[in-house]
Image (tube, rainbow, N blue to C red):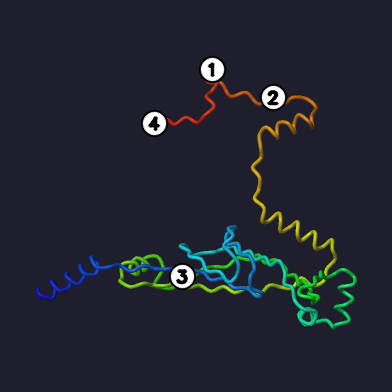
Amino acid sequence: MRGYHCLAILALAAVCMGPTGCVQRTITITSDPPHAIVWLNDEEIGRTPVTVPFTFYGKYDVRIVHEGQWMSRDEAAQVLDVSGAELKALIEDGHLDTRAIEGEQMVLIRYLPLSTAVRANAPVWDMPGLDLLAEITPGRKRVELDWHFELDKAGPVDEEVLIWHARQMRALVAPRPVPDEDAVEDEAKTETGRHVPAPAPPADAAGDAAPAGPINASPR
């Protein structure tokens, strides 16, 4: 009986001292049409198809933007589900952009931006508690999540609508500027026409002004 206990202890020691495994987690994002720009939690990660590693499970914010596709008039009519005469009228009215590429007139098909939230779910063996066993077990484990998105065609729209969408996307993509305290004070002077003094710092019990910076008191 003692021999079996010794064998069990040796086997456990071999597992602990031997090469441990690791878990490789990736998310692959594809889209139709491809080559769209992808933001994952407000961080640009590339163009579809794109694969990125991840560490934590849970909800991820996904934003996908496509600049548009240039295609022939026949392809554009098929994608927009219009006749050749209707496509010609849309082009003449300025609802669709065109360009000559290698002597052929091409039509730009635009797509609406997509913003959504997707949850990355863990397999059973990678859930809290069991994931520790997966980490120490020899061998490489993989979690490969595949997310596919279909972009809706914008269709022929007025120029004012296109400008509005462009401004909305610029506001989403552009970083928010940090307000400048001096600029805010100057703006207050301009609006009121007089100098607005900054509030005085509070005084302590002795009547002296309180220090401007934080105080790191030692624990008692």
Q: What residue would you read off at disc 4?
A: 218
Is tag 3's residue or tag 2's residue first in the polypeptide sequence?
Answer: 3
Q: What residue type is disc 3 on? A: Ala
| SS class, disc 3 | loop
| SS class, disc 1 | loop
Q: What residue would you read off at disc 2?
A: 197
Q: Quadrant of the C terminus?
A: top left
Residue at left offset 52%, top offset 24%: 211
Q: Quadrant of the N terminus?
A: bottom left
Is tag 1's residue or tag 3's residue first in the polypeptide sequence?
Answer: 3
214 or 17, nearer to the observer? 17
Q: What residue would you read off at disc 3?
A: 122
Answer few, some or many: residues within 10 Å of disc 3's Cα (few below 14, many 20 plus, some between 14 and 19).
some
192 or 151, nearer to the observer? 151
Answer few, some or many: residues within 10 Å of disc 4's Cα (few below 14, many 20 plus, some between 14 and 19).
few
Distance from Cα at disc 4 to Cα at disc 3: 43 Å
Residue most extreme to the left: 2
Q: What residue would you read off at disc 1?
A: 208
Q: Is residue 133 above or below residue 80?
A: above
Expressed as whole percent of the image width and height from the top left, the position of residue 17 reads 23, 65
